[in-house]
Image (tube, rainbow, N blue to C red):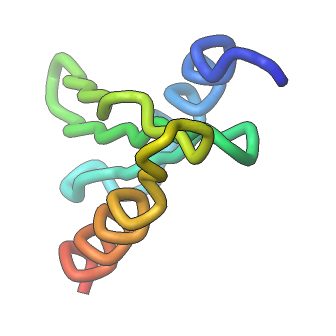
């Protein structure tokens, strides 16, 4: 498994190249069992936010948190 933190710069670059500067841009990096969500607000100085690292490998499976975040993103984009 690779570290999710190595994928964040590439995901951030893709997010920054979004053709819709007035909208929030969401991203997700995963290695299949761990997840980090990203959010970009494009302004004069772009502002990024990262979620905590969620994992399916803990005793407390965080799958429902991941699904809840995906549902909230879908609602925000509607």
Name the one closer to the observer, 10 or 35: 35
Quadrant the N terminus occupies: top right
Q: Percent position (x, y) of residue 31?
A: 74, 38
Label total for image: 0
Tell me what residue is drawn at x 38 percent, y 38 percent. 38
- Residue 2 horizontal side relative to residue 27, left or right: right
Tell me what residue is drawn at x 28 percent, y 49 percent. 21
> Compared with residue 78, is residue 30 higher up or lower down, i.e. above or below?
above
Tell me what residue is drawn at x 52 percent, y 46 percent. 28
- Residue 2 horizontal side relative to residue 52, left or right: right
Q: Percent position (x, y) of residue 63?
A: 47, 60
Quadrant the C terminus occupies: bottom left
- Residue 30 horizontal side relative to residue 35, left or right: right
In which image quadrant can residue 46 be found? top left
Q: Percent position (x, y) of residue 75?
A: 22, 82
Tell me what residue is drawn at x 47 percent, y 47 percent. 27
> Compared with residue 54, is residue 69 higher up or lower down, i.e. above or below?
below
> Compared with residue 74, is residue 52 higher up or lower down, i.e. above or below?
above
Q: Residue furthest right?
A: 1
> Compared with residue 6, is residue 72 higher up or lower down, i.e. above or below?
below
Q: Residue furthest front?
A: 59
Name the one closer to the observer, 3 or 14: 3
Q: Percent position (x, y) of residue 35?
A: 53, 41
């Amino acid at each position: 498994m690779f570290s999710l933190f190595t994928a964040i710069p590439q995901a951030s670059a893709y997010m920054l190249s979004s053709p819709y500067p007035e909208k929030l841009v969401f991203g997700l990096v995963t290695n299949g069992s761990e997840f980090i969500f990203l959010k970009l607000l494009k302004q004069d100085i772009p502002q990024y936010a990262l979620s905590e690292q969620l994992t399916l490998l803990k005793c407390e499976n965080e799958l429902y948190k991941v699904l809840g975040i995906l549902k909230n993103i879908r609602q925000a984009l509607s």
